[in-house]
Image (tube, rainbow, N blue to C red):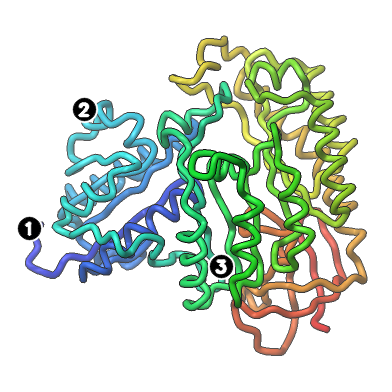
Amino acid sequence: MKTRSLRKDKINIITLGCSKNLVDSEVLSGQLLANNIDVVHENKKIDHNIVIVNTCGFIDKAKEESVNTILEQVELKRRGKLDKVYVTGCLSERYKNNLEEEIPEVDAYFGTMELPRILKTLEADYKAELVGERLLSTPSHYAYMKISEGCNRTCSFCAIPLMRGKHVSRPIEELVSEAERLVRTGVKEVMLIAQELTYYGLDIYKKRDLPRLLHALADVKGLEWIRLHYAYPSKFPIEIIDAIKERPNICNYLDMPLQHAANNMLKAMKRQITREEMTDLIHDIRSRLPEICLRTTLIAGFPGETADDVEELKGFLEEHRFDRVGIFTYSHEEGTSAHDLVDDVPQEVKEERAREIMEVQQEISYEKNQEKLGKTFKVLIDKKESGRYLGRTEYDSVEVDNEVIVQTDQKLKPGQFVNVRITKAYDFDLEGELI
């Protein structure tokens, strides 16, 4: 790798977008480290001479952030602060030709599946024996684990299949080995991620086999929490809930993006499910496991959405009282089937609708948190900040859900489990004391 610098190369990886991108960066870091190349993640010291920007191309705001980050790094290169700038990830996969024309100062662009080519460019060898190994950029007590890549769904708003390809499951044995390695490094919690968890196994085992994977991971000694993210509701394998119920180290937590509740919107979004079917599924899940925490994600402002559709969605939230809700405003993505529709909801209306919907959820979240007052929960300590400890219950995932604020003179460590009695409850956070 020829650079203008005489010092040993040091590579900084900047990761934008979702946890799946983060895992890709961690895998790249592990490969570079195995090649004796100095690598850091989100380095603040700027003592590196090479940057790899792992981009997101999911929605407009993410694309804008990715482009701005690339331009910032190119400017550092122009000023002589960097020798090389490389770009990978979803934006690069989707818009490589455009980016090469508009930002030619980048030394090379790579797609989402071009890890060996990145390594070759950096004069490093791809080490197949490192499959599943990576250099964690998260705190050492938790990690994301990608169980599959790509997606076979055809949701009209989603560009992920354009950037990540078809669904490909990873074998159970490989995932169990990865979990065992993570535990040996101090990981207590793994968050299972994929574009679509419930599709797991259809390609390699010819059936939806997530329940079998869950049981295999639950057998890994020292793995205390297993958490499920991004489960599609259509044709949901209800055996997943049985596995959660049967295994104490699988969190009573399910992230199941529903996107909307009005049937005309669900049909236009090509979600392959109706409001009535979603209602039956939610009732089935909660009847089997009443203590489960249900998280969902919604979209405001899809083409053709009316004020009545928004009211129906709000009513759906009030009916089902989800524990956690996230919301996006619709982004008109070229290459998706929804791009053929007229993007007829103005951006300010999209944002106002999103605010209205979250106001409904805020009240629900406050009431649900009030019900926790006086109760004791097992809490995983994540960090110390401003003289207090911040942790999470099994009902809360990293960054997107509630935190538990723990005030104590005792010295606690990240990754430590403690029992906390809740003394205060807010809209989206809790406070408590050690028991």
Secondary structure at badge 2 equals helix
User: Which label sits on residue 101?
Assistant: 2
Q: Residue 375 location, x and y as percent? A: 90, 70
Q: Residue 25 location, x and y as percent? A: 37, 55
Q: Nearer the viewer, residue 55 or 236?
A: 236
In the picture provided, is 78 more to the left or to the right than 418? left
Q: Residue 373 location, x and y as percent? A: 91, 66
User: Which label sits on residue 212?
Assistant: none
Quarter of the image containing the N terminus?
bottom left
The vertical placement of 100 against 246, above or below, is above
Q: In percent of the image, x 43 and y 35: which residue is there?
A: 57
Secondary structure at badge 1 equals loop
Q: In percent of the image, x 63 and y 69: which residue is there?
A: 219
- CB atoms at circles 3 and 2 under 8 Å apart? no
Which image quadrant is residue 357 in? top right
Q: How far apart are marks 3 and 2 (CA)?
A: 40 Å
* Other-residue count near label 3 (Cα within 10 Å), few / some / many at <14 / 14–19 / ≥20: many
- CB atoms at circles 1 and 3 under 8 Å apart? no
In the picture provided, is 135 more to the left or to the right than 392? left
Quarter of the image containing the C terminus?
bottom right
Q: In percent of the image, x 11 and y 69: which residue is there?
A: 7
Residue found farthest to the bottom: 410
User: Which label sits on residue 4?
Assistant: 1
* Other-residue count near label 2 (Cα within 10 Å), few / some / many at <14 / 14–19 / ≥20: few
In the picture provided, is 12 more to the left or to the right than 356? left
Type of amino acid under label 2 = Glu
| Dot placed on the residue nearer the N-terminal end, 1 or 3 | 1
| Dot placed on the residue nearer the N-terminal end, 1 or 2 | 1
Type of amino acid under label 1 = Arg
User: Which label sits on residue 142?
Assistant: 3
| Dot placed on the residue nearer the N-terminal end, 3 or 2 | 2
Type of amino acid under label 3 = Tyr
